[in-house]
Image (cartoon, rainbow, N blue to C red):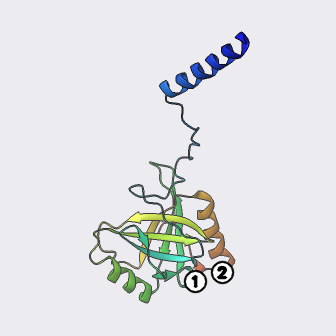
Amino acid sequence: MLARKSRSYRFVLAALLAMMLGCQPARVAQPQGSSCSIDGVSLDVSGREDGLYGVRDGQLEGAPIARLATMQLAGTGVNAEDGKRWLGLQLSEDDARRIEDFTRFPERLGIAVVAGGKLVSHHKVRQALTSPRVQVSCCDARACERVVGLFYAGVAGSAQRSASGSPGT
């Protein structure tokens, strides 16, 4: 009988100690640069075709503004400050016009790149995008590699690199 009371006391003591210490389930840390959320909003891209999407008030638009098949890979690189890979994309005239129209009034807007069912990039729009050349930083290195592979395999548009490898040259 004394042994049962002793076990009960130990259990209650352990439960109280856990509550006092703030026992919480373990959280798995995300590798740096793997999150594509902005202001705590993550986008669900499941079932989306490959392309560049508009994001309005934290919601992905229904269809891409530009499809990867109509873009060219203008360059790739790695940002020296944060180590994130970037892609330089050349848009068609029609796609560039649609991007400019979408971003004309940029408040609460974003742009997201989707490839292979994965979110590659998600950026806030701070000003209207008026150039057919855009540079996006990848928040998922594997998805970024997938995009580059699509261009070189000819599944997406074409891959053209300038001498410096950067867009806009």
User: x, y percentage for residue 150?
Assistant: 65, 74
Q: Disc 1 marks which residue?
A: 69
Q: Position of residue 4 (x, y in %)?
A: 71, 16
Q: Residue at x 64, y 67 (%)?
A: 146
Check disc 1 and report its element: helix, strand or loop: helix
Residue 3 is situated, as x and y percent measured from the top left of the image, at 73, 12
Say if 56 sits above or below 101 in the image. above
Return the residue nearer the eye: 128 or 80.
Answer: 128
Q: Secondary structure at mark 2?
A: loop
Residue 52 visible to an observer of this rendering: yes
What residue is shown at x 38% (from left), y 80% (from top)? 99
Disc 2 crowd rating (10 Å Cα; few below 14, some 14-19, many 20+) is few
Using the image, tell me which numbered label, if any, was put on residue 103: none
Farthest residue to the front: give it. Answer: 1
Name the image quarter holding residue 111: bottom left
Label whose residue precedes the other's in the sequence (1 or 2):
1
Instruction: Using the rendered view, name the quadrant where residue 148 is placed.
Output: bottom right
- The x, y position of residue 65, in whole percent, is 45, 82
Quadrant location of the N terminus in the rendered image: top right
Q: Out of 22 and 32, give the one closest to the viewer.
A: 22
Quadrant (top left/top right/bottom left/bottom right) for the C terminus: bottom left
Q: Residue at x 47, y 49 (%)?
A: 82
Are the two marked residues, 1 and 2, in contact with CB atoms closer than 8 angstroms? Answer: yes
In the displayed structure, would residue 123 be above or below residue 133? above
Q: Which residue is disc 2 drawn over?
A: 155
Q: Visible in this render: residue 162?
A: no
The residues tagged by marks 1 and 2 sit, at their Cα atoms, a distance apart of 7 Å
